[in-house]
Amino acid sequence: MRKRETAALVALAAVLVVVLPLCNLLPPGSPFHISNFTLNLFGKFLTYAILALGLDLLWGYSGVLSLGHGVFFGLGAYAMGMHLMLEIGTQSVYQNALPDFMVWNQVKTLPLFWQPFKSAWFTVFAVMAVPAAVALVFGFLAFRSRIRGVYFSIITQAFALSAWLVFNRNEMNLGGTNGLADFKTIFGFRLSQPGTQRMLYVVTALALVGAYALCRWITRSRAGKVLVAIRDSETRVLFSGYAPANYKLFVFVVSAILAGVAGALYAPQVGIITPAKMGVLPSIEMVVWVAAGGRGTLIGAVLGAFGVNWMQSWLTTSYPDLWLFFLGALFMGVVLFFPDGILGAIGRLGSRIWNRGRSTAPGTPKLADTTSGHGGPMARTPQTPS
Amino acid sequence: MKQLSLLLLLCVAWLAAPAASHAQSPEALKALADLAIDDGDKREAAVAVIGGTKDPKWIEFLTALREGSVYALTKGKAVEVVVGGAKSTKGDQDVIEITTAYDRKPLGTVPLATLTEIAADRRLRIAIKPFLDSDETKTQLASPDAETRRGAAVKLGHQAEASAAPVVEAAIARETNAQVKHTLQEALAMIRLAGGDAAVRVLAAQTLGGLHSFDAVPALQKLAADASASAAERTAATAAVRQIERWGLMIRVVETTFQGASLASILLLMSVGLAIVFGLMGVINMAHGELMALGAYSTFVIQNVFRAKWPAYFDAYFIVALPVSFIVAAAVGVVLERGVIRRLYGRPLETLLLTWGASLIIQQALRLWFGAANVDVSSPTWLSGGFPLMTGLTLPFNRLFIIALAAVSVAGMYWLLFRTNRGLTIRAVTQNRSMSACLGVRAGVVDAVTFGLGAGLAGLAGCALTQIGNVGPSLGQNYIVDSFMVVVTGGVGKLAGTILAAAGIGGLNKGIEPALGAVFAKVAILIAVIIFLQRRPAGLFATRGRNAEA
């Protein structure tokens, strides 16, 4: 079983990393041709999938629901965006070495915190380090004082709101509401060329495979077992001599780094990053990707990120009024009817058919156990209604 | 070129002014003829000439011109400018009585069709205004409307023309309204400060200081820095400025406190419902903000119904809107609870996502139904205006009303929870759900009632918010995160915690807003809450005992 699963995953990874870019290289007339636009769209979805993996690790495995992951995504994207802005140099509208918005805002010299982003290496480091540092401080304060469950979710939501408000301010020197845009090159390659976009796509796909491998490794490790135990009964883990706060902090930081990497890959592919990407609504939307795909499965998070966003890009162009209805219904429907997501639903259906043929059930319904019963992982009211 | 000729004309007018006391001054008559010509520049120049005579009769003519009752009467080739009077209908013709422009000699009645109105367009009205103002302001002092009298007094104070002093003095003597009297005294002192000799100015400066006149600060500062003024004048002016500034500081303190109380009461109105539901069921209702929006839109609809059906009783709409918005929000709340939330008890994180989904749907429905733009809700007259607490500080009635509403709601909540049977069951289920159920409390009914109550309070908050803010589909989003913070800080299950937290967060927010600005004040609040939760992770009043932590 494990072998077959691995084979399927490798095949999926190969399709994402090798086959899709090759299809893009085919001449436009070919039936297997994938347009630059579609490949770019897929690249965007893949960055979301990287973020969703981290969120799944945090929520699906450790039971910590963060409604503020848009902030970490934004931090990574802004770190990359700052480097790209500086790479524009004098090719900008005002032909000034400073980014355009600084010229508008009458900023004369480059602010100090922009200086190190001239270096590509520092940027790659900052993309991970900045979200990690913020997550470390925030998580330390939150988990140390045992803020958990709904309390933690609300605090992270306020965190997202605050970050959104702050990044919208012009005096932060981060472009205000308009954010960072008009990137020209990345590490010397022109972003307008299809080759660069294809390369970015491949890098994103590889990053996703790497992120998946990392998350899989964490969940298979001893620490992963402790995380699941924390989700199911934190108090019991505490009394068994573990320090749940440290484990949760670790996962929180890892997921923040993944979100930062996702953001950094998002910025050059989409070409713009604004505070609107890190507010309350985008942050909670990320949660629904994981929920829809099936949490606590990792692959479900990837599928959810893909599926929901595909749906979004189709609905917002065809029926813009309906998108929010759909999203709301998705929130409600997933929670009410598919607590273990699409993957869980398919799995249940599959195992039912399987069971008809054989007498033993080989499926792994470990997630369904914890989510479909009463008194789930973070129950605040210990008594279940009769 | 045109400007030059205008200037020239003005010069002529100025030179002619002394002589123009004689009625039929040729310049004014020529200007009068110019008025009939449809040319903006010429008309403007003509008004300047006519006004420049300062002849009361000509000023009266300008008043008529501004009101649009001046006409050009064509007699063959000659054009005469006349003033129109009463209109009437003779046969199938509209006719009008006309008089001469200057001394209003009746010229008989002519058909309206033979006249061309000299329209007082914007430019002409602006040209006329300065000639009428000084007169008008003085007449306004005798107006029956207190607000007009006050406005006139403020204007006279700023103009500070010595000639106005006797008029103001007379007005003070007959004034009965304390506020207007205060303003008049201020104006008089400002007039005296501008003119008058040293002793009068010292006295005026002292008076202004005593009256806490903010309007006089620039004049006083100018006097304090004036090298040509005597030492006594300068000291008096400096002392007065200092006195006024001290008063200003005090007002700011009182004002900030009031704003803090106002914000706190809004937060309280919103979070009481949220906190009770959270305490009872462990459910954070993310759709609470949208229930508020529903309340606000109900108010909007009620307002429109009153405007269309019973315009005479328009002021009463708000009285009707309060219970209606409560009922609408409560009904939606009960449907939400019975329909979906009750399936998810014991799973607070899932409920959070579920209610968020519901909030998106309600929000989008409101947007499609009422449009994405903000709708207009006008205040009833009894909520506009304010209570003048002290000089320079008026407490708006709408904010006072919200503070009162929050107080009444919380008092009602206390009464309900601690003085009624229903309240007893709510508290019992909050403490121990299964034990209460065993003892015959129907927990499901308690849940529905409580959720409906919390939703209704949200609707009430939404109704109150229409009086102070914009009403749009995303109304709830602006306050909702703040009210979550109140609930988290206040802790579960105790109303006192919610009240204290609302007061603390509201007060802190308004207290640091002047220093940091609105955005960074919000960030500071978040940091403060996180630090606070370090000490008390479960809020101000935590539930203690075996069930405290699941």
Image (cartoon, helix red, strand yellow):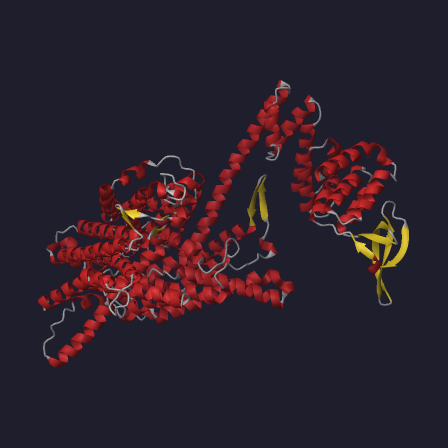
Quadrant location of the C terminus of chain B?
A: bottom left
Q: Which quadrant holds residue B285?
A: bottom left
Residue at x 43% of width, y 44% of height: B518
* Residue B363 pos. (x, y %): 42, 63
Residue at x 69% of width, y 41% of height: B152
Q: Is residue A210 visible?
A: yes
Residue at x 90% of width, y 51% of height: B106
* Residue B143 pos. (x, y %): 73, 46
* Position of residue A168 in the picture relative to residue A238 (left or right): right
**Against B454, is B520 above or below?**
above
Q: Which quadrant holds residue B85?
A: bottom right
Frontmost residue, A234 versus A125 = A125
Single out the residue that lies furthest toward the bottom: A356
* Residue A62 pos. (x, y %): 20, 57
Q: Is residue A147 visible?
A: no
Frontmost residue, A90 versus B525 = A90
* Position of residue B25 in the picture relative to residue B430 (left or right): right
Q: Which quadrant holds residue B128?
A: top right
Counting labels gives: 0
Frontmost residue, B483 versus B193 = B193
* Residue B328 pos. (x, y %): 47, 67
Quadrant location of the N terminus of chain B?
A: top right
